[in-house]
Amino acid sequence: MDSGCVSLLVPKQLQGHKDAFLRGTFASSASAEQNRTAYVIVVTRTDVSCDASVGYISNKPNMKSDPRTSSVWVTLRTHSHVSLTSLKILGQPVPLSEVNLVFYDLNEICQSELISRKYPYVKEKDHANDVVPYFIHCVQSDAKEHHPKRRNELLLLLLWAVVRLFLAVSWMPKILFEAFHSFLRNHLDYSSSFLQQILLRICQIKKIQDDVRAGKSSLLCGRLLTMIAIDVLAGVCVACIISSYASVGDMYSSFCSWTKLLAATVHRLLDWLSGAPAGLKLNQPLTQALSAFFSYHVHLWILYLELADPVLRGVAWVLVWVGMCGASVQVAILSDLLDLATLHLHCFYIYGARLYNLQTSLLGSQWRAFRGRKWNPLKQRVDTYDAGGAISLRRVLTAVVFTLVVFLLPTTTIYYLVFVLLRISLKLARGLLAGIVWALNINPLYLVLLNISGSNRVKGDIYFSTLTDQQQGEAVEGNCEGPLLLSLCTWPSSLSHILTDASPNTFPSRPSPNWSFILSSIMFGEHLL
């Protein structure tokens, strides 16, 4: 029989193993060009039963093993080291010189999650000539089938109970939070950081429940558990530090004092703008009217805080205790409180932006009309039109309106720029808080530690190396016509690859500003920041 090349993969864990049958799988591939058949044989474990076995460990001298009806029969010796004694394919002996004997670490292949994703298994492929994916599939499938995860461990049961309890308690609040969050987004165009973080945390714990129910411990599950544990521990530490210096009532009183101080500062800013800010000559009637309008809103805001004091104080108690869910929740609450305390500044920015946009749009349209042009909304272009004479009433009115807008625009622009700067400052503060929440939510400490320690779970690269001359001599046992001895080694994947592979939609995306939108919004005031 022209057997061709045979690749035999044997686990290193068989060294010193007693006599037993070998379990595994094999595949073949015929080559019409070379008229040869290639075989790959993967030994995965030992068994006392001879049914469906592919070989036998024979450490006793002159011991003959019956290959039964198996197409492939491997005989190994594992007394002091693993060596190949004989190999038969379809009942015919195969010369050992045509065999590639590959030793691999069973634990490295079974425990790795990334290696099967880097070398995906395709059932219709030529496995004898594409050994690695077939080998990984066989080893990991056999490990899942005959070595299932134990589900009766105390730690796993405790984790299952805690997760189930949390999901049962959060079932009704989750529905309420989702409905309220949808209402804020659809009707008020506002996205609450606190609600987003709570819903994300419930989604993350639901993912942990799915992994625990499946009886597996994935990289994602370990990363989520580590991230939540560190987040909660940091939140508890922050709450303990704050409570040791001040109570919730004191914190709320400080928040109210800071809010009123902010309102008083804005009121002084409006008084400064109503005069001659930085020596600029503004339109006095318009600037006094705008100052009075915005000052009235500041007084309304202070009155609102005084009337809503009992309700807001009760909400503060609830939010502080909910913040014990983690430091990310506490930072998200702080972000929402910042929006609540500066709501009047957001309103000022909206008023200023709309007034500025109205005047710039009116200035552009009057300039086009003065030159005998107009904007065609149907064709989305500027057309010419006949004004009905060299000097008409329409052109006179256009010139008057254009002149009024030109003289009023500097005053409006000053107010708009001041409110834009306040809005950008608040956006930067909120972006900083959002970045802190994002950093707490993507905590990669678990994966970094696995990568540094060289854990089998993050190994995803494979390479082959030849054994030393001494090792070859031991495995061949003096037979110069022995097989080629190789060692299959694994190497941890790069940290960037590990982070990418273990970061699905259970982690929030990195907050990044849209600079083109921000610049266009500031320049023309058409869109709100």
Image: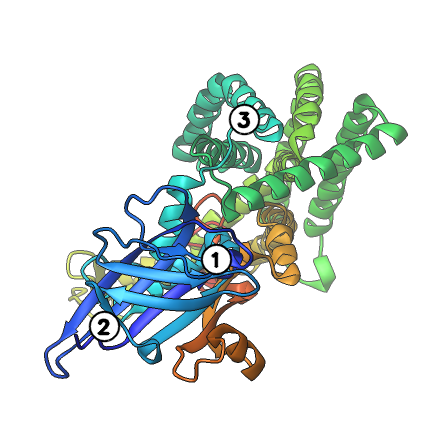
Query: What residue is shown at x 18% (from left), y 69% (from top)?
Result: 29
Q: How many marks?
A: 3
Q: Which mark is residue 60?
A: 1
Compute the Cα span from label 1 to label 3.
40 Å
Dot 3 falls on a residue whose secondary structure is: loop
The crowd level at tag 2 (other Cα within 10 Å; few <14, some 14-19, many 20+) is: some
Q: Position of residue 18 (x, y in %)?
A: 51, 51
Query: What residue is shown at x 12% (from left), y 80% (from top)?
Result: 35
Between 416 and 167, which is closer to the camera in this rendering?
Answer: 167
View extreme (left): residue: 32
Provide the residue designation for mark 2: 38
In the rendered image, is residue 408 in sight?
no
Check contact, mark 1 vs mark 2: CB within 8 A. Answer: no
Between 165 and 493, which is closer to the camera in this rendering?
Answer: 493
Compute the Cα span from label 1 to label 2.
31 Å
Compute the Cα span from label 2 to label 3.
44 Å
**Which callout, 2 or 3, points to the residue nearer the camera?**
2
Dot 1 falls on a residue whose secondary structure is: loop
Between 115 and 369, which is closer to the camera in this rendering?
Answer: 115
Between 475 and 315, which is closer to the camera in this rendering?
Answer: 475
